[in-house]
Image (cartoon, rainbow, N blue to C red):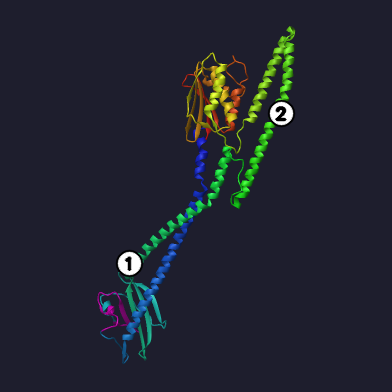
Amino acid sequence: MSEAELSKPAVRRRDESLRVRLMLGTAVLAVLFMLALLPALRGAFVIALEQSIEKRLASDAAGLVSAARNEQGRLSMPDKLPAEEFDTLEAKLLGFIYDRQGTLVWQSRSSLDESVSYRPRYDGRGHEFVRISDAQGREFFVYDVEIDLLRGQSAAFSVVTMQPASDYQAMYDGFMGQLYLWLGGALLVLLGLLWFGLTWGFRSLRGLSAELDQVEAGTLEGLSEEHPRELLRLTGSLNRLLESERQQRERYRHSLDDLAHSLKTPLAVLQSVAEVIDKQPQSREQSQVLQQQIERMSQQIGYQLQRASLRKSGLIRHSAPLAPLLDTLCGALDKVYRDKQVQVLRDFAAEQHLPMERGALLELLGNLLENAYRLCLGQVCVSVRQQSGVLELCVEDDGPGVPADQRERILRRGERLDAQHPGQGIGTAVVKDIIESYGGELLLEDSVLGGASFRVRLSE
């Protein structure tokens, strides 16, 4: 297991934030809604604008009709029109009057320098409002109304008023600019409200997370019922799981205690029998064999009991201080190896904690230190390093070290290189089992002190 692999779960948890995912989803939906709303608002504005232009041109056309005269079947227009824009060359309001055949019979002064090609159709439709383009590509709004009576006399004319569409382009551009500005501001306000709503809605989940942290730390036995009813089923299931695990752990511990006590008596009887046999010279060899087997059985039973009891809890997250445990173990080992006068170097913070149960850490560190004391020349180093969510505990010595081709074998259960000392190689197997139960890794390398370096890597 590499350092990158150990740090992957933490990265994945950060990437899968539920609030961020919901916020991104709602933000995308809000943006899509605004994009869909934009053409609808733009279309509504264009419709309202064209209706307003149509009403204005219709009013101007009505002004031309009111000024017109029918003299002996011929159209007569006064020199001064009610709407001054028709009489000004610079004006953009154009006026035309056509007869039944579509022949131009009158045009306003404002249209004299314009070359708009338009031919009305006198077909009884009443009036129409259209948009046309001239030869230069300029667009005009056109209002065309048919006249059957003119001041009580029969007539047949088409009164046409026009205005360039460019006159309203600035109004349209201004509206679109304001529309973009207001929709952008509305989107920002909406996203802010969504973030606030999600933050407020996830408050209950944060409370649940805080309680789970307390349960993992061992300061709380179970989750409370002060949560929204949608979460009560989840908290109830977690509480049942916690209680079931707690009861199973207690039953397991009691069963192990009962097993240990039940095996002590038969082993003690066998030991006493071996001592009696040992007093008989002719049976001394058989007595030694019997004692060796009894000792091996005791070690195997102890190993299996340790292996079964020193497992990581599935829900409780433990943390144990390193310095006090190291003081206790070094004090005991200094008495055992008093002739060596071992110097223990420490390279970690005084308040350093390891993410393990106290009993498991005591067993792990005890085995590693006992191995280092036994094989060192006079110096042992205990250090801790933290990097990228990975914690590394290192126990080194200045002894003979372990050959590279023998390191894999020594980590296997029951294997040992030091054949001069009694034992079955159980300590390293216990260490490896404990580390694996916590999802960690045990490495054996060369030490800068000259001996072996046991490195324990755990995910924080």
| Residue linked to disc 1 | 170
At 68% from the left and 16% from the top, the residue drawn is 292
Disc 2 and disc 1: Cα gap in Å?
Answer: 93 Å
2 vs 1, front mark: 2
Q: Which mark is residue 131?
A: none
Towards the viewer: 364 or 69? 364
Question: Which quadrant of the structure image shows residue 140?
Answer: bottom left
Q: Position of residue 13 (x, y in %)?
A: 52, 42
Towards the viewer: 253 or 113? 253
Does residue 431 show up?
Answer: no
Q: Amino acid type of disc 2? A: Asp
Q: Position of residue 210 (x, y in %)?
A: 55, 44
Which residues make up the magenta segment? 80-106
Q: Which mark is residue 258?
A: 2
Dot 1 falls on a residue whose secondary structure is helix
First reached walking from the N terminus: tag 2 or tag 1 = 1
Does residue 148 show up?
Answer: yes
List the single residue furthest toward the top.
Answer: 281
Position above or below: 329 against 438: above
Q: Position of residue 65 (x, y in %)?
A: 34, 84
